[in-house]
Amino acid sequence: MENKGEIREGEIPFLLMDLNRKGWTGILFLEKEKIKKEFYIKNGMIGYSRSNLLSETLGRVMLSYGLIKAAEHQKALEIMEKKKIKWGEALIELGYREDISNALRAQIEVRVKDIFQWKDGRWEIFAKEVVENRFPFWSEIDMVYLISKGISAMDEAFFMRNRENFLNSIYRVGVKDGRVRIPPSVENLFNGEFTGKDFINAIGDENKGLRALYFFEVVGVIKKVKMVSKSEKKEDVHVLPEDKEIYNKLLEKFNFLKTASFFERLGVEREASINEIKEKYYALAREFHPDRFHSYKSEAVRDLADRIFTLINDAYNTLSDPQKREEYSSFADESTNFTFGKKEDIVTAETQFQKAEILEKRGDLKSALEFYRWAYKLNPKEPVYMAKMGWTAYRIGKREKNLDMVREGMKDVFKAYSLSPQNDTIAYLVASIYRAEGDHKKTIEFLEKTLNLNPLHEQAKRELNILKRKEKV
């Protein structure tokens, strides 16, 4: 299998299942904009994970799942800051040793659910020995279980966009897997070929049927034999015979560049000097600048040249700027060179965030906003900080009739949701924006999303019940 590639919507579950079937051992690294995650896999089972999202820290997950109280969460933060230790170590000091195993499993589940929502980004696998006792904690979870949980939490829009393809594709039985229960209503379909529509009709509910069909295909219980949908047919790329050779050369280059790191795009080492980077860039510019291809009659050649040079330019503009290069350089250790930001900054940011929440509850929005901004400045990779900063700015803007502040606040909240759609806190803030703007339908939609992500979210539950009672009046 390939060791790296682009993330496309709906393909991550297949990647995880492939690693499970192969009994693979190593590290799976995923990156989308500023979000980075690692999953440590042994014999096809995830036992440990890392993420730079604050909402996915052990403490936050335990808080969300009701495994720890807010006051104890604050104490753990204080211990972390004072002793410069990790979440797990601080929680053990507070007597939560027995709960940590359950929390770790929940944490892995939360992180997997999030990546199932990604529509873009990049992934890379590193085959290497994974020794359990080298990790602070290790708690394996069955991959089929994780995939089922991830698919159950996927956005309904994915299934609606692909509905026609699911319904019209033809399937047949695949491999047997004792971890997967086959509903009696579909067993008779497994004697031959059947359409997705046949499967969904046998389930008796389209929403459940679409998810079940996709899940069965991902885990290999059924295999897609033929795609009937017209919407899947790709238009042929028209290339004149005399341009075929150059087109194929450019296509090969493009396919390499689109999944390569910025250093690989320019063909330089990670320690390369600015002069070396410029030298490599100018050499690539001489070879691939779009002006060199304007004389070709095939539009496909010219278009490909433009796309290649855009990828090269993106790499150069980042690596030639010391500040941008330092931010981009997420590779530093022997495995994936995965960095999550300075530990001290992250702990300090969380402390400021907690202070902001206290001030917000007291109604001191302006002071709260300053602390939220401070937290975000220290750790700009955390979508929750951005969302809370945006929501507080929105509230102040509404109160003071400052439309610029209202718009900026809305922008931050929606941006945070696009970065982390599996975060119930952010989903609830989106619902709150729509409620304040008077959009009844969207408010209900995002309150329901919040409860789907966290059934224990009392505020969302209460507000949804009120809105639904009003609908009946």
Image (cartoon, rainbow, N blue to C red):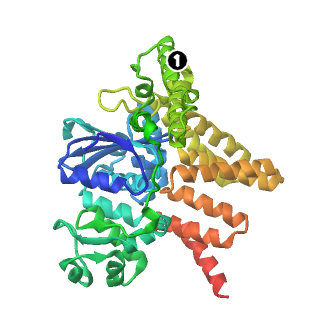
Residue 304's spot in the image, x, y percent?
50, 38
Q: Quadrant of the N terminus?
A: top left
Q: Is residue 303 above or below residue 67?
A: above
Residue situated furthest bottom in the rendering? 473
Nearer to the camera, 419 or 382: 419
Would residue 354 be found to the left or right of residue 276 on screen? right
Q: Is residue 190 above or below residue 437?
A: below
The residue that disc 1 covers is 282
Residue located 54% across and 57% down the image:
425
Nearer to the camera, 114 or 48: 114
The picture quadrant where one finds residue 351 is: top right
Residue 43's spot in the image, x, y percent?
17, 47
Q: Quadrant of the C terminus?
A: bottom right
**Residue 90 visible to the viewer:** yes
Three-letter amino acid code at the position of disc 1: Tyr
Residue situated furthest front in the rendering? 242
Q: Is residue 213 above or below residue 150?
A: below
Nearer to the camera, 203 or 115: 203
Q: How many marks?
A: 1
Residue located 21% across and 83% down the image:
188
**Residue 357 visible to the viewer:** no
Residue 400's spot in the image, x, y percent?
82, 52
Instruction: Label 1, secondary structure: give it.
Output: helix
Crowding at mark 1 (Cα within 10 Å: few <14, some 14-19, many 20+):
some
Residue 309's spot in the image, x, y percent?
53, 31
Nearer to the camera, 230 or 219: 230
Would residue 418 be found to the left or right of residue 232 on screen? right
